[in-house]
Image (cartoon, rainbow, N blue to C red):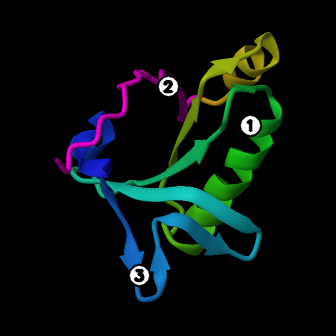
Amino acid sequence: NWENTEFGNKLELIQEGDKFSQQYPTKIGKIDILARDKKSGQYVVVELKKGKTSDDVVGQIARYMGWIEEKKANGRPIKGIIICAQYDRRLYYALKRLVDTEVYIYHVDFRLEEFRDRTK
């Protein structure tokens, strides 16, 4: 459903041979989502976190961004996006030093519908 998100309008998913955007394999770990800005061509590393996250994600996303910058972007700047449900103050302070990384909070809307046999 990438195209149905706000990111789908701005970012394109990457497919390079047998490497896909989701769980993009590198020698230093798998990047959750690797995308490219549709206008600028800038690489964007997206890190997904369940629930609440802290400053440890900063080291992780910085590592991936550094690898992409060196191996794929020829030294051009890389953008980072962290998506989580909540964050703590440690993440807030760690992000003050990263000008090229944004955080988005996700919300899940959940509803129940009573089961009814619709084959009749």
Q: Earlier in the sequence, mark 3 or mark 1?
A: 3
Q: In this rendering, is residue 58 above or below 119?
A: above
Return the residue at label 3: 16
Q: Position of residue 107 (x, y in %)?
A: 48, 21
Return the residue at label 1: 58
Which residue is rendered at x = 40% and y = 21% of the image? 111
Q: Earlier in the sequence, mark 3 or mark 2?
A: 3
Q: Nearer the viewer, residue 62 or 107?
A: 107
Residue extending farthest left: 120
Which residue is rendered at x = 67% and y = 57% of the image? 64
Return the residue at label 2: 106
Q: Secondary structure at mark 1?
A: helix
Residue extending farthest front: 120
In terms of secondary structure, what is the magenta stretch mainly? loop
In magenta, the rendered stretch is: 99-120
Which amino acid lies under the numbered mark 1 shown in the image of this protein?
A: Val
Q: Secondary structure at mark 2?
A: loop
Question: Residue 51 vs residue 1: left or right?
Answer: right
Q: Tell me whether circle 3 and circle 1 mark residues in contact (CB < 8 Å).
A: no
Q: Tell me whether circle 2 and circle 1 mark residues in contact (CB < 8 Å).
A: no
Which residue is rendered at x = 41% and y = 23% of the image? 112
Which residue is rendered at x = 79% and y = 26% of the image? 54
Q: In this rendering, is residue 3 above or below 76?
A: above
Spatial CA span between label 2 and label 1: 18 Å
Q: Secondary structure at mark 3?
A: strand
Q: Nearer the viewer, residue 75 or 104?
A: 104
Q: Position of residue 49 (x, y in %)?
A: 66, 38
Q: Is residue 107 magenta?
A: yes
